Amino acid sequence: MDQASEVMTRLQKEIVGRSAIGVLGLALLLGGWKTFSTGLEISKDNRERAARLASARDSELGFRPRRSPGGSGLFFALGSLLMVGGAVGVLAAVLPTNTFARLIGPPSYTTLGEHGEDVARRF
């Protein structure tokens, strides 16, 4: 076999890389959405359970139980984090490379000094 036929071209590498990032981004978006919706279900269940307990305790003891989020905050945080990561992955797969680099890249200059005065102070 010819060595040139074994090596992928730059365009083929770009297509494979972008599709892999796109699939990973979509998977993260789906996982984040499912995690976030699980947090919603947990908080809804906790509210319903607290309402049932409150009505039973109010009639028997005359006081209301304290309200707590019931542990759904972790699901909301993880779901949000996964969705942000998935959105970045999908953007990386869809946008041109130079546009994506400008979008998430470091700022050109800091607010310290004049523009171009100190390149070492760039973030």
Image: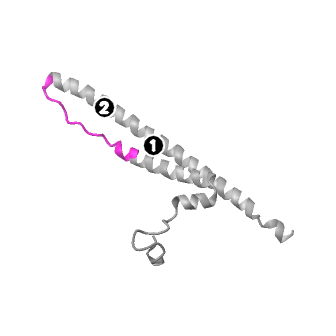
* Residue 57 image point, x, y percent: 18, 26
In this figure, which colouring scheme has been used for the structure? one colour
* Secondary element at tag 1: helix
Q: Residue 61 colored magenta?
A: yes
> Mark 1 highlights which residue?
35
The disc, 2 or 1, on the residue closer to the chain's N-terminal end is 1
The region drawn magenta spans: 60-76
The picture quadrant where one finds residue 110 is bottom left
Rendered view: 78 above or below 116: above
Rendered view: 42 above or below 114: above
* Residue 24 image point, x, y percent: 58, 52
| Quadrant assignment for the C terminus | bottom left
Tell me the amino acid under the disc marked 1: Thr
Number of residue marks: 2
Rendered view: 120 above or below 48: below
Q: Residue 79 colored magenta?
A: no
